[in-house]
C-alpha cells in the first residue's frame, strides 16, 4: 500500500474551475470532505485522521484514513488506506509502526509507512461495533451485539450468529415485545445487546478467541444510538476496563442513570458499579497514569438529559469522590488528561462557540485554550494537541496547539480547492434583551454578494434540542450558508433553553416550551430588524427542526403575522401524543414535569394541535418515515390539518431517513424543495 499525497486533486480543481466562482449551495455542501477523529502517534511526530468523501452516484459517504507529518510545517496530508476500503476509527499501535482501523465490520491493521498489505485483525462471524487497544497493544476491547442468553455458551459469538441465521430462514416475521424499547432512533429492537469482549493479539497480528467480560450487564456498551469511545477505557496497566452503561431493566426509556463500571480484562470477576450512589448520568471514564484516580463526567438530576456535566475525581481505593469544577457554569464534554496529570481538557458550549478548555485538576479553574469557532474531536500527546475546528464559514480542518495554549497552527486544508470557488456570507453575533430582561444572543449571516443599498428576504432559523444552540460552527444539515447562497439573509436566535449561557438559562425552557422561547424569538426578530436595516421584514420565512419544528407549529397559531411562509422539519405537532409515541420517554416526561396521565394539563399548555384554527401561513412539512424520535404521524397530522384548512401546503417525506436527512441525494432534494418554497413565497 503506497501513501497517496493529496496536493490539489486535478479532477476536483477542473470541475470547480469550470463552475467558476459561485454562491455556496447544497451541491457544494454535500461534496465537501469531512475531516474528523485526529490521533497523534505515540512518538508525537504524526497524526492519523479520518476523511469522509462523498460518492454522489452511489448516494453515500466513503471513508479513508490519512496521515500528516507534525514535524514538517510544509507537509502535505497523505492518504494511508486504499480508496477501495471504507476505513474509519484510526488508532495507533503501541509502537507507532501501524494504524488500526475498522472496515466491513471488522478491525484491520496497516503499516503506517504505507508499505505492506493490511492485516485483518478480527475475522468474526458478526460485526464489531467499536474497539480500543490496550496501552501495551497486546489486547483489544471489542463491542459486539449478542443475544444475552448466548453469554452462557462457550462461544457467545457463534451462538449469536446461529440465532441470526435461524431468524433469517424463518418465514414468520412477527416480533413479540414485553418491555420497552421496542425501537430506538431508527432501529427496531431485536433482542441483542452490545457487549464487551477482550481478545489477545497474537504475533501474527490477529486476535485469539475473544472472551466476554460484561456477562450479566443488561445494557448496551457503548450506548445506543450515539455512544462513542469516550464511554470506555483501559486502565494504564491494561488489566481493567472501565465503561459507562445504563442498566435497562424495565425502565430504560425513562432513565438517564448511566453508571461507570470496572471489570478485569481477563473476566476473572464480575463488573463492579463504581458510581451507583448517583442516580443521574455518569460517563467518560479517564484513569490517571498511576491508576489511582478515575476522572469522569457526572450529572446530578436523574432523567434530565441536558443537565450540567461536572468533572469528577474518584479515589479508586476508597471510592471517595469530589467535583473538580463546581464553580464553572458550563457543561463539559470530551474529557482527556494531560501527560503530567495536572490538567484535564474538555470542550463545552460557550456563548455561541464550542471552545477547548484546560481545567486545573487542583483548583478546578477553567481556561480557554482554543476557540474562534467550534472544536470537535481532539488528541493530546505530550506537549501537543491536534484538534478539528469549524466555523460558520469553514468546514472542519485540523489544527495544532501547545498543551499550554498559544497560537493554533492549521495542519490541513482538505477542502481548499472546492472552497476557493465558492462565496459565503459574512456573519456576526448580536445580543438583545429577551424574556425576563435577560441578555440573549443571536447570529446574523449576510447573503452572498451583499449590497448595503439593497433589501434582502430573510430565513429565520429556529434550532432544535431544545437544549442546543446555533453558533460559530459548520453543519451538513442546517447550514445557514446554503440560504445565504440563495440570496437570503439569515437570522438565528439562541432563546432561553439554549446551551452555552449557564445552566440556569438552559434549565429555563423545561415546562415552558411556548413561553420564554417564543418571547425571545419575537424580541430577537424585532432587534434584528432594527439593527440590520437591509432585512426585508415583509419577505421572511421561519424554519425549524425537531424542537424548532415544534416552534414552527406553535408560531403558526401564536405568531404567524410576520411570516410569508413556514418550513417544519420533524416537529412535534401534538405534544400529548409525543408523550406516548416517542422512544426516549425521559425527555418528554422531564420537559412536561410528568407523564401525560399524571400531568395532562402540562402537555396541553403549549400544545400546537390546539391552535390549528388560527393557522394561516403557507407551510412546507418535512417528516421522514424512519424517525422514531418524533414519529412521522406527527408530520402527516399537521399536513392533514393544513390541507383540511385550505392553507397552501406541501409534504416532503423520505422512507429511508430518520430524524436527520443524511443521504447526499436526499439532502439535495431536501434543500431544493425548501429553497423553492422560500423563493415562491418571498418573491417580489
Image (cartoon, grey):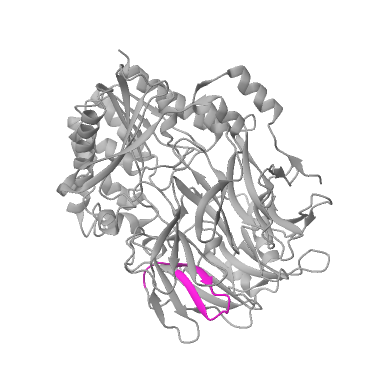
Q: Position of residue 246 (x, y in %)?
A: 45, 67
Q: Position of residue 485 (x, y in %)?
A: 44, 24
Number of marks in picture: 0
Whether residue 224 is visible, yes or no, is: no
Residue 88 painted magenta: no
- The image quarter in which residue 366 lies: bottom left
Tell me what residue is drawn at x 70 percent, y 37 percent: 6
Tell me what residue is drawn at x 53 percent, y 62 percent: 230
**287 left or right, relative to 41:** left
Query: Considering only vertical position in the picture, is 95 above or below 182?
Result: below
Q: Position of residue 337 (x, y in %)?
A: 52, 67
**656 left or right, relative to 532:** right
Residue furthest bottom as drawn: 318
Residue 283 painted magenta: yes
In depth, the one of 296 and 437 nearer the eye is: 437
Tell me what residue is drawn at x 41 percent, y 24 percent: 675
Query: Considering only vertical position in the picture, is 298 above or below 662?
Result: below
Residue furthest top as drawn: 684
Magenta residues, start to end: 279-296
Residue furthest front as drawn: 406
Query: Considering only vertical position in the picture, is 350 above or below 42?
Result: above
In depth, the one of 430 and 167 nearer the eye is: 430
Whether residue 157 is visible, yes or no, is: yes
Q: Position of residue 575 (x, y in %)?
A: 27, 46
Where does the C terminus fall, quadrant-wise? top left
Amino acid at each position: 500500500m503506497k501513501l497517496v499525497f493529496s496536493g490539489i486533486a486535478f479532477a476536483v480543481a477542473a470541475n470547480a474551475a469550470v463552475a467558476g466562482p459561485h454562491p455556496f449551495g447544497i451541491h457544494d455542501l454535500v461534496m465537501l470532505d469531512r475531516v474528523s477523529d485526529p490521533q497523534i502517534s505515540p512518538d508525537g511526530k504524526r497524526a492519523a485522521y479520518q476523511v469522509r468523501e462523498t460518492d454522489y452516484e452511489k448516494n453515500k459517504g466513503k471513508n479513508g484514513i490519512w496521515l500528516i507529518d507534525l514535524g514538517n510545517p510544509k507537509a502535505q496530508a497523505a492518504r494511508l488506506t486504499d480508496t477501495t476500503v471504507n476505513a474509519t476509527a484510526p488508532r495507533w499501535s503501541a509502537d507507532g509502526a501501524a494504524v488500526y482501523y475498522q472496515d466491513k465490520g471488522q478491525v484491520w491493521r496497516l503499516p503506517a509507512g504505507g508499505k505492506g498489505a493490511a492485516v485483518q485483525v478480527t475475522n468474526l462471524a458478526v460485526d464489531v461495533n467499536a474497539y480500543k487497544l490496550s496501552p501495551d497493544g497486546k489486547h483489544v476491547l471489542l463491542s459486539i451485539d449478542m443475544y444475552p442468553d448466548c453469554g452462557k455458551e462457550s462461544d457467545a459469538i457463534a451462538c449469536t450468529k446461529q440465532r441470526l441465521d435461524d431468524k433469517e430462514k424463518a418465514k414468520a416475521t412477527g416480533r413479540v415485545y414485553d418491555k420497552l424499547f421496542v425501537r430506538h432512533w431508527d432501529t427496531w429492537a431485536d433482542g441483542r445487546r452490545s457487549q464487551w469482549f477482550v481478545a489477545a493479539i497474537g504475533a501474527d497480528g490477529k486476535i485469539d478467541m475473544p472472551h466476554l467480560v460484561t456477562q450479566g450487564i443488561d445494557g448496551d456498551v457503548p450506548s445506543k444510538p450515539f455512544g462513542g469511545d469516550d464511554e470506555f477505557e483501559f486502565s494504564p496497566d491494561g488489566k481493567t476496563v472501565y465503561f459507562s452503561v445504563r442498566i435497562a431493566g424495565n425502565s430504560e426509556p425513562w432513565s438517564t442513570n448511566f453508571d461507570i463500571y470496572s471489570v478485569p480484562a481477563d473476566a476473572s470477576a464480575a463488573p463492579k458499579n463504581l458510581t451507583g450512589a448517583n442516580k443521574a448520568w455518569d460517563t467518560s471514564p479517564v484513569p490517571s497514569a498511576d491508576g489511582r484516580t478515575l476522572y469522569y463526567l457526572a450529572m446530578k438530576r436523574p432523567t434530565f438529559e441536558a443537565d450540567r456535566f461536572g468533572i469528577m475525581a474518584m479515589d479508586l481505593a476508597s471510592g471517595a469522590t469530589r467535583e473538580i469544577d463546581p464553580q464553572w457554569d458550563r457543561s463539559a464534554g470530551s474529557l482527556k488528561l494531560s501527560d503530567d496529570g495536572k490538567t484535564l481538557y474538555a470542550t463545552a458550549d460557550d456563548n455561541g462557540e464550542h471552545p477547548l478548555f484546560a481545567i486545573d485538576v487542583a483548583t478546578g479553574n477553567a481556561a480557554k485554550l482554543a476557540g474562534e469557532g467550534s472544536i470537535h474531536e481532539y488528541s493530546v500527546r505530550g506537549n501537543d494537541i491536534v484538534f478539528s475546528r469549524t466555523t460558520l464559514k469553514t468546514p472542519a480542518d485540523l489544527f495544532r496547539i501547545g498543551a499550554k495554549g498559544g497560537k493554533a497552527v492549521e495542519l490541513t486544508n482538505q477542502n481548499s480547492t472546492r472552497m476557493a470557488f465558492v462565496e459565503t456570507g459574512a456573519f456576526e453575533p448580536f445580543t438583545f434583551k429577551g424574556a425576563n430582561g435577560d441578555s440573549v444572543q443571536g447570529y446574523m449571516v449576510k447573503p452572498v454578494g451583499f449590497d448595503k443599498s439593497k433589501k434582502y428576504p430573510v430565513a429565520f432559523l429556529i434550532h432544535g434540542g431544545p437544549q442546543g444552540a446555533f453558533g460559530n460552527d459548520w453543519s451538513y444539515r442546517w447550514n445557514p450558508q446554503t440560504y445565504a447562497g440563495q440570496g437570503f439573509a439569515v437570522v438565528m436566535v439562541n432563546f432561553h433553553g439554549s446551551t452555552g449561557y449557564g445552566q440556569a438559562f438552559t434549565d429555563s425552557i423545561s415546562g415552558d416550551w411556548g413561553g420564554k422561547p417564543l418571547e425571545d424569538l419575537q424580541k430577537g426578530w424585532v432587534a434584528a430588524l432594527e439593527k440590520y436595516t437591509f432585512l426585508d421584514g415583509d419577505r421572511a420565512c421561519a424554519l425549524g427542526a425537531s424542537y424548532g419544528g415544534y416552534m414552527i407549529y406553535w408560531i403558526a397559531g401564536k405568531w404567524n403575522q410576520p411570516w410569508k411562509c413556514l418550513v417544519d422539519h420533524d416537529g412535534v405537532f401534538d405534544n400529548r401524543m409525543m408523550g406516548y409515541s416517542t422512544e426516549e420517554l425521559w425527555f418528554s416526561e422531564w420537559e412536561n414535569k410528568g407523564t401525560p396521565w399524571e400531568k395532562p394539563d402540562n402537555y396541553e399548555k403549549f400544545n400546537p394541535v390546539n391552535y390549528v384554527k388560527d393557522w394561516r401561513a403557507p407551510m412546507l412539512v418535512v417528516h421522514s418515515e424512519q424517525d422514531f424520535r418524533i414519529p412521522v404521524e406527527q408530520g402527516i397530522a399537521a399536513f392533514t390539518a393544513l390541507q383540511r384548512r385550505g392553507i397552501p401546503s406541501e409534504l416532503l417525506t423520505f422512507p429511508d431517513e430518520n430524524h436527520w436527512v443524511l443521504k447526499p441525494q436526499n439532502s439535495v432534494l431536501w434543500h431544493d424543495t425548501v429553497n423553492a418554497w422560500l423563493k415562491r413565497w418571498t418573491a417580489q
